[in-house]
Image: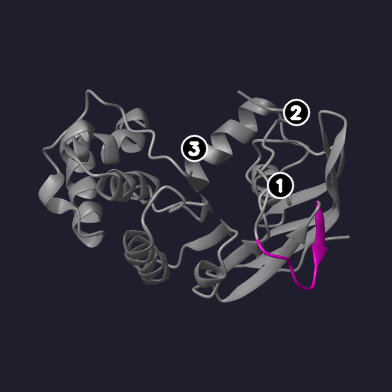
Amino acid sequence: MAPPDNDVLWARSLHCALGGTEALTGVSLGVREGEILALAGPRGSGKTTLMRCLSGQLVAQQGEVWFNSSPVHTLSPAQRERLRRDRFGWIGPEPGLVPELTGWENAALPLLLRGVSHRAAKTAALEWLDRLDIGTSALKRPHALTQSQRQRIAIARALVTTPSVLFADEPTAALHQADGAQVLRTLTAAARSHGITVLLATHDGDVAALADRTVALLDGRRVGTVPPASGAEGVAACSLSV
């Protein structure tokens, strides 16, 4: 079965076992181009596992994943790594900045690793830092920044390549509510202005409300509603590429 033409990401019947436990059980999903889709559910529901399968970090034991009508699940590890580098962006709960680099250098890192000139990479990084209201911290190193500022730089780093799809895995989990809400508003506005498709994993209903559509997960299955958050999100590799 071919995926729909208007779905930038499409998955069918994903089954993924982690440590002997079924993390995904027959999950199917379609994501339209330019859509902001929330993956909602308590910790341990399979949100992170699903995003890692969709982004090519994991290969499910069963099922298919397609990006722009091309199969991801049949790619080699090197091909999946190239796809993630060239077409996808990823934001996790923690910024993961390089402590020796300044704000703009951290944001520009994906471009510099691609071989983009120093001047062009710096210009693009500074533009994104300004869009995310963190331009004044471009010359500061991570130790001199607040957690909210560091996370904004991580978001700029994920967006600086203008990815086709941005995967945001609980991107404001470590922030206070007010800071998190502001960061998310900035992220979603930036994504919409550049036509970037966003998958946003969250256990917070207020965060999910920022999305165009919500898909709820519970115990590795798609469900209609989810209970209040509890437990811990299980994250491991089915077949983890380097």
What is the three-letter code of the residue carrying label 1?
Gly
Q: Quadrant of the C terminus?
A: top right
Instruction: Compare residues 14 and 113 and report the one nearer the observer.
Output: 14
Asked if marks 1 and 2 touch (Cβ < 8 Å), the reply is no
Circle 3 packing at 10 Å, graded few (<14), some (14-19), many (20+), is: some
Residue 33: x and y in percent read: 58, 68
Viewer-side label of 3, 2: 2
Viewer-side label of 3, 1: 1
Residue 36 part of the magenta-drawn span: no
Q: Earlier in the sequence, mark 3 or mark 2?
A: 3
Q: Which residues are magenta?
A: 220-228
What residue would you read off at disc 2? 239
What residue would you read off at disc 1? 44
Q: Is residue 203 above or below residue 77?
A: below
Instruction: Compare residues 234 and 184 and report the one nearer the observer.
Output: 234
Q: Earlier in the sequence, mark 1 or mark 2?
A: 1
Residue 116 visible here: no
Indicate the quadrant where residue 131 lies: bottom left
**Mark 1: which secondary structure?**
loop
At x 10%, y 51%, the residue is 136
Instruction: Compare residues 121 and 126 and report the one nearer the observer.
Output: 126
What is the three-letter code of the residue carrying label 2?
Ser
**Mark 2: which secondary structure?**
loop
Viewer-side label of 1, 2: 1
Asked if marks 3 and 2 touch (Cβ < 8 Å), the reply is no
Q: Is residue 149 left or right of residue 228?
A: left
Residue 21: x and y in percent read: 86, 36
Q: Earlier in the sequence, mark 3 or mark 1?
A: 1
**Mark 3: which secondary structure?**
helix
At x 25%, y 48%, the residue is 149
Residue 56: x and y in percent read: 66, 40
